[in-house]
Image (tube, helix red, strand yellow):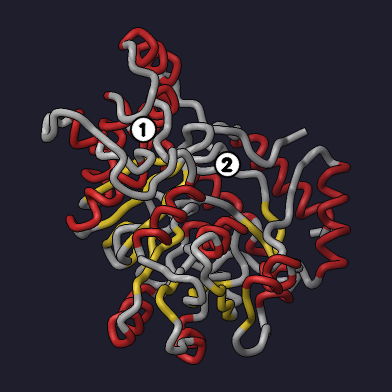
Amino acid sequence: MIRFNKAPFVGNEMQYMQQAIEGGKLCGDGPFTKKCSQKMCEAFGAEHVLLTTSCTHALEMAAFLCGLQPGDEVIMPSYTFVSTADAFVLQGAKIVFVDVHPETMNIDETKIEAAITERTKVIVPVHYAGVACEMDTIMEIARRHGLKVVEDAAQGVNAWYKGRALGTIGDFGCYSFHETKNYTMGEGGALVFRDDKYVEPAEILREKGTNRSKFFRGQIDKYTWVDYGSSYLPSDLNAAYLYAQLEKLDEINEKRHQIFQYYHEHLKPLEEAGYLELPHVPEGCVHNAHMYYVKTKDLETRTRLISYMKEKGVLCVFHYIPLHTAPAGRRFGRFCGEDVYTTKESERLMRLPMFYNLPMEDVEYVVKCLLEYHEY
């Protein structure tokens, strides 16, 4: 069976994890944690990067740092993972969902303004498949209305919008290093931000509400509980695994693009014949080949195709069920405007195997199966 995903492995992970063990500091904020943060600041032009235990926790930190109060509203697409909404619901916010662009599955920036009320505090663009949302427009809307922007860049690590790394454009950016992502630490994430004023409150929040980070920098002679916080700091063992991959940032990116491009070129005849729709990358966006998906005619067609590919030994999968259709989505949020594309397009989308260590002969076989199914 050709798996849909397998966590990347570049070769130095075990060596660095051994170094972390021998260094005697496996808990958070050790040498590899610092190296990862510095590497990302340099690679992505970020001001501040704090590793977290997950992208979910990065989102929770961002929600807290936005100063949300119960009843405040947060605008986001419904086509996203539950964590995008959960993080803000935990702060008592009401979620306002808007429709997506069918070409990218990203939030339709032209629908945002109509969703803004006097209670709106945050806009959350989700960069689906590592393809950027229309950030210039979103940032302009936020500026005019005095709103914060939290980029859910879980899938957007090392992807770019008009020369700027995703996650570095809004007030906060949130990365994922889950095993399904381009670069991984098993479970993990990062909070990215520009403004220095968030450094101390973010450190306190991540360190269980204590000023422990200042203590370790020698700025105070003892640390204590000073504010709300939680345990958002990952083990240095996890960071050691990630650092090996950040060192191979370009190599991993190139291999994933090779797979993406092979799919794109060899499935083009099926798009031209009207059987499938292929991904679209808008001008000014540099994607990171996080995933390759196709869109079938409808849900019934997708179900048959997934079943056929499984019979052929290829695991293909669908993705999100729109949040506004879920019980919690109905309880904690509402959909603003008409759901023209979110549900319809989500039912057509099927993801193909895509991971760094995927052999190219397996990629060729996936294409062969798709061509044979459509008798092409």
Q: Name the residue nearer the viewer: 153 or 235.
A: 235
Q: Is residue 186 left or right of residue 251?
A: right
Kind of residue at disc 2: Thr
> Is 136 located above or below residue 12 in the figure?
below
Q: Position of residue 64 (x, y in %)?
A: 40, 59
Q: Position of residue 274 (x, y in %)?
A: 73, 73
Q: Name the residue nearer the viewer: 54 or 301.
A: 54
Q: Name the residue nearer the viewer: 322 or 222.
A: 222
Q: Nearer the viewer, mark 2 or mark 1?
A: 2
Q: Name the residue nearer the viewer: 351 or 72.
A: 72
Q: Position of residue 245 (x, y in %)?
A: 40, 31
Instruction: Determine which quarter of the picture holds residue 38.
Output: top left
Q: Is residue 255 left or right of residue 36?
A: right
Inspect this view and state whether residue 255 appears: no
Q: Is residue 96 left or right of residue 324?
A: left
Q: At 41% from the left edge and 63% from the top edge, which residue is drawn?
A: 151
Mark 2 neighbour class, 10 Å CA radius: few under 14, some 14 to 19, many 20 or more: many
> Is 6 located above or below residue 140 in the figure?
above
Q: Which residue is labeled 1 in the image?
A: 248
Q: Secondary structure at mark 2?
A: loop
Q: At 85% from the left edge and 59% from the top edge, which residue is drawn?
A: 303
Q: Label 2 vs label 1: CA separation? A: 17 Å
User: In the rendered image, which quarter contains the C terminus?
Assistant: bottom right
Kind of residue at disc 1: Lys
Q: Secondary structure at mark 1?
A: loop
Mark found first going from the N terminus, 2 or 1: 2
Q: Residue furthest left?
A: 219
User: In the rendered image, which quarter contains the N terminus?
Assistant: top right
Mark 1 neighbour class, 10 Å CA radius: few under 14, some 14 to 19, many 20 or more: some
Q: At 51% from the left edge and 58% from the top edge, which residue is drawn?
A: 87
Q: Which residue is labeled 2 in the image?
A: 180
- The numbered mark at residue 171 is none
